[in-house]
Image: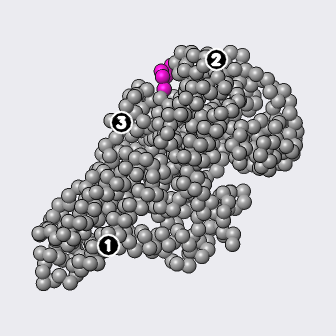
């Protein structure tokens, strides 16, 4: 039985604050999964960090009058604060501008090179006529020569999914300033994906339990693999560890290669900071470990084809053979959990078009669990989903405040008023037993859904139990049992047991509220642990923030825990406040206005 779970959340890019569309894909689903697995007794390692290299950082830096490093420092800190505010339980959330990360990236690159899967070849590279700088493929846009999509990028067409080169585009132009790029011959290293294709396709054939859209998209992509550039003419990124290249001022490892390797480098860094330098191997070279990768649908092929291809090559398992890297034979992904897009007025959130809701603004106004709940229950798990303020207000008011919050408040209030503590239960009726049985059965039902990353169904089942408990209270009417205190107390005891069970089921989704409910039921200590921001450094260099956490001591376990009669109860305060209904029409003053 699997005992260790590696949870890898995609790396947010350091070219600005994150918006709620971003965190609906990589962040909240990964945390729900990791928290559930810890509660179920698994040994979880959850890692990620800020992606800080590449042309986009240079462009952002130029626009703000900063250096690339200053830009990365600025936005890394903002992103760390936002993710901590959301309660994302990373064992380590780090960054790509570390000595450790560079060393791990270079070792993987060198291994692929030595095994013959990274090869040098000449190509035409795009140059900005006005600046003389190389234009990264993603900053060139034009019409796809295969499907005719007018918004294709120089590396890939998001419409048909085909890999492209910028020179293939019809009417190519720079996304930065609109100018037509010049193409000059340059030499770069390429990942020889065709030499890995047979092994990749065989492995993909075993991934039968992935989400259908992931299998379909990845299988089609793997049918026609081409060599993919892994270096670029840039001066901001990880240096190329090959003789004759390592000191080149304008040659760096491509940011995508750098970023996907971050899952491994973050695990290595976590082990070192934990004082157990080899502990990362328990999740990367262990047949009893499973690995789950969380991202938006625009990153599917990087995680289902390219990153596995890199691992196969570094393991020496492609068509050219080879020897494993210094890291040993690394495990390939167990599951790829991709989300669709959270949109607004039918299109993606966009900072440049002022169609964006930043995480920190949302947290300041509504707190973390309202957003976490919305993403879980109404987010883009299986299809693109439009965010509306009306739907958000409805969910908070009718589901969180009226259903869940009211169940907690009135159950505890009646017990506090009549007994001052959790009441003793007398003889149980069939109705009592039915609710308790439903609550106990929910752990298997919801747990099975979360095991398969079916978050929307999982929280739906948990909220169904909330509805059953509310109906039970309404039907049993303990407030009318003044002349029968034994029956009144029995009803309240059963209701409070259901509240405790509902709270456990909802803990992965809403850990902050779960802590409050745990305390309202008379609990003390940590129920659902939260990450903390820690300032660290490397070899005496400048400090930087990371997210870490001690989750082993939290009390939450994925099981029905009997409540203890006699536990003192204080008068509760509301867990969720209702929102002004008028907010549903326009949103807060700072929010963009949705298009009609």
Residue at image coords 53%, 54%: 381
Instruction: First in sequence, mark 2 or 3: give its number.
Output: 3
For label 1, the residue is 470
Q: Where is residue 420 shown, x and y percent of the image?
A: 18, 72
Q: Residues within 10 Å of mark 2 (few under 14, many from 20)?
A: many
Residue 2: mark in rendering: 3
Q: Inspect this view and state whether residue 247 appears.
A: no
Q: Is residue 61 above or below residue 482?
A: above
Describe the element under mark 3 as helix, strand or loop: loop
Specify the color scheme. Answer: one colour
How many neighbours does mark 3 have within 10 angstroms: few (below 14), some (14-19), or many (20 or more)?
A: few
Q: Quadrant of residue 491?
A: bottom left
What distance separates the C-alpha of mark 2 from that of mark 1? 64 Å
Tell me which segment is drawn in magenta.
325-330
Q: Is residue 339 left or right of residue 464?
A: right
Residue at (54, 15) in percent of width and height: 323
Name the quadrant containing residue 61.
Answer: top right
Point out residue 119 in the picture as x, y percentages from the top left corner. 69, 20
Element on which disc 2 rests: loop
**Residue 328 part of the magenta-drawn span:** yes
Tell me the number on the disc at residue 275: none
Q: Name the residue rendered at 69%, 61% in the picture.
A: 354
Front one among 203 and 544: 203
| Labels 2 and 1 touching (C-beta < 8 A) | no
Q: Which residue is mark 2?
A: 116
């Amino acid at each position: 039985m699997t005992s260790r779970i590696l949870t890898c959340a995609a790396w947010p890019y350091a070219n600005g604050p994150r918006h709620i569309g971003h965190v609906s894909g990589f962040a909240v689903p990964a945390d729900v999964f990791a928290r559930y697995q810890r509660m179920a007794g698994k040994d979880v390692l959850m890692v990620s960090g800020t992606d800080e290299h590449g042309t986009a950082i240079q462009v952002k830096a130029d626009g703000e009058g900063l250096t690339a490093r200053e830009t990365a420092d600025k936005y890394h800190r903002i992103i760390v604060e936002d993710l901590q505010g959301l309660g994302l339980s990373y064992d380590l959330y780090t960054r790509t501008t570390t000595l450790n990360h560079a060393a791990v990236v270079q070792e993987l690159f060198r291994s692929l090179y030595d095994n013959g899967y990274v090869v040098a070849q000449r190509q035409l590279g795009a140059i900005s006529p006005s600046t003389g700088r190389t234009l990264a493929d993603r900053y060139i846009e034009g019409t796809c020569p295969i499907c005719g999509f007018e918004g294709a990028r120089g590396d890939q067409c998001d419409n048909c999914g085909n890999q492209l080169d910028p020179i293939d585009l019809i009417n190519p132009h720079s996304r930065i300033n609109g100018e037509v790029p010049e193409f000059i011959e340059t030499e770069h290293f390429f990942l020889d994906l065709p030499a890995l294709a047979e092994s990749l396709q065989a492995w993909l054939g075993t991934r039968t339990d992935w989400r259908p859209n992931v299998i379909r998209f990845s299988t089609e992509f793997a049918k026609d693999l081409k060599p993919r550039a892994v270096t670029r003419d840039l001066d901001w990124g990880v240096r190329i560890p090959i003789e004759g290249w390592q000191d080149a001022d304008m040659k760096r490892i491509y940011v995508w290669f750098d970023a996907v390797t971050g899952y491994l480098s973050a695990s290595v860094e976590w082990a070192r900071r934990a004082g157990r330098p080899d502990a990362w191997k328990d999740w990367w070279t262990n047949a009893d470990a499973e690995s789950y990768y969380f991202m938006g649908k625009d990153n599917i092929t990087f995680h289902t084809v390219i990153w596995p291809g890199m691992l196969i090559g570094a393991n020496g398992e492609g068509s050219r053979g080879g020897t494993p890297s210094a890291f040993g034979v690394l495990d390939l992904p167990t599951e790829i959990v991709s989300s669709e897009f959270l949109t607004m007025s039918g299109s993606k959130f966009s900072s440049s078009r002022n169609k964006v809701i930043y995480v920190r603004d949302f947290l300041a106004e509504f707190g973390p669990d309202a957003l976490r709940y919305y993403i879980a229950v109404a987010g883009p798990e299986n299809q693109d989903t439009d965010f509306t303020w009306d739907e958000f207000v409805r969910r908070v008011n009718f589901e969180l405040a009226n259903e869940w919050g009211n169940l907690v408040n009135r159950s505890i209030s009646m017990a506090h008023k009549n007994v001052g503590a959790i009441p003793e239960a007398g003889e149980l009726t069939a109705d009592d037993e039915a609710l308790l049985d439903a609550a106990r059965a929910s752990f298997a039902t919801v747990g099975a859904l979360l095991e398969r990353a079916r978050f929307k169904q999982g929280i739906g089942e948990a909220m169904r139990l909330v509805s059953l408990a509310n109906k039970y209270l309404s039907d049993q009417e303990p407030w009318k049992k003044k002349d029968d205190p034994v029956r009144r107390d029995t009803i309240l005891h059963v209701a409070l047991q259901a509240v405790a069970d509902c709270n456990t089921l909802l803990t992965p989704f809403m850990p902050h509220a779960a802590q409050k409910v745990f305390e309202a039921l008379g609990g003390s200590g940590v129920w659902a642990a939260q990450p903390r921001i820690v300032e660290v450094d490397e070899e005496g260099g400048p400090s930087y923030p990371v997210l870490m956490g001690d989750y082993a001591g939290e009390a939450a376990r994925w099981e029905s825990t009997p409540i203890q009669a006699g536990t003192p109860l204080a008068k509760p305060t509301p867990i969720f406040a209702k929102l002004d209904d008028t907010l549903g029409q326009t949103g807060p003053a700072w929010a963009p206005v949705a298009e009609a």
